[in-house]
Image: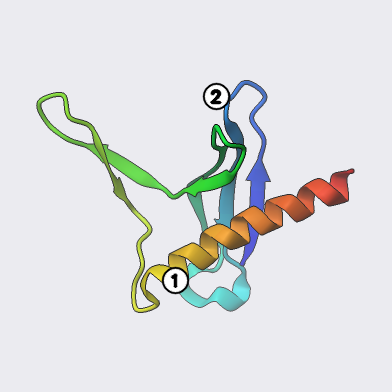
Amino acid sequence: MRIEFIDRESGPKNLISDAEIHFEIEDGLLAGLKLVGFSLWRSEAGDPGVTVPGRPWGDAGERKFFDLLRAGDGGGDALRKLKAALCAQHRLRGRSAA
């Protein structure tokens, strides 16, 4: 699997980058597919954060998001590791571009 970042020229103020996970031949049934919808954001304090693909839902004017990628048997640690890996890969990308 590999991570690709997509920079948006005219994105929202705190958007750092969008990201996709591309699955390689060794990834079995997911080979040749990509998981889109990840975004890296900068908080007001300057810290990076990651949002995962989600779907909006709600009624009576209340809008919530249903995360499409969730922790499975790995528990919450698996999702935290993925988010940390996305941030780390983006930092490495920035260093190699400099």
Q: Give yes or no for contact between labels 1 and 2 (Cβ–Cβ under 8 Å).
A: no
User: In what quadrant of the picture does the C terminus appear?
Assistant: top right
Q: Is the residue marked by circle 1 packed among few (<14), some (14-19), or many (20+) residues within 10 Å? A: few
Mark 1 vs mark 2, CA separation in Å = 29 Å
**Residue under pointer 1:** 77
Return the x and y of residue 49 as percentages of the image width and height.
53, 46
Residue pictured at 38% horizontal, 58% vertical: 69
Residue pictured at 10% horizontal, 26% vertical: 60
The kind of secondary structure element at disc 1 is helix
Q: Report which quarter residue 3 is drawn in.
A: bottom right
Q: In the image, which is nearer the foreground, mark 1 or mark 2? A: 1
Q: Above or below — where is 83 with respect to 58?
A: below
Return the x and y of residue 66 as percentages of the image width and height.
27, 47
Q: How is the image coloured?
A: rainbow
Query: Farthest residue in the front direction?
Result: 45
Query: Farthest residue in the top direction?
Result: 10
Q: Above or below — where is 88 with respect to 28?
A: above
User: In what quadrant of the picture does the N terminus appear?
Assistant: bottom right
Of 35 and 38, nearer the camera is 38
Instruction: Specify the amino acid type for callout 1.
Output: Asp
Q: Report which quarter residue 21 is drawn in.
A: bottom right
**Residue under pointer 2:** 12
Locate residue 47 relative to residue 88 in the image: left or right: left
Locate residue 92 relative to residue 1 in the image: left or right: right
Query: Farthest residue in the left direction?
Result: 60
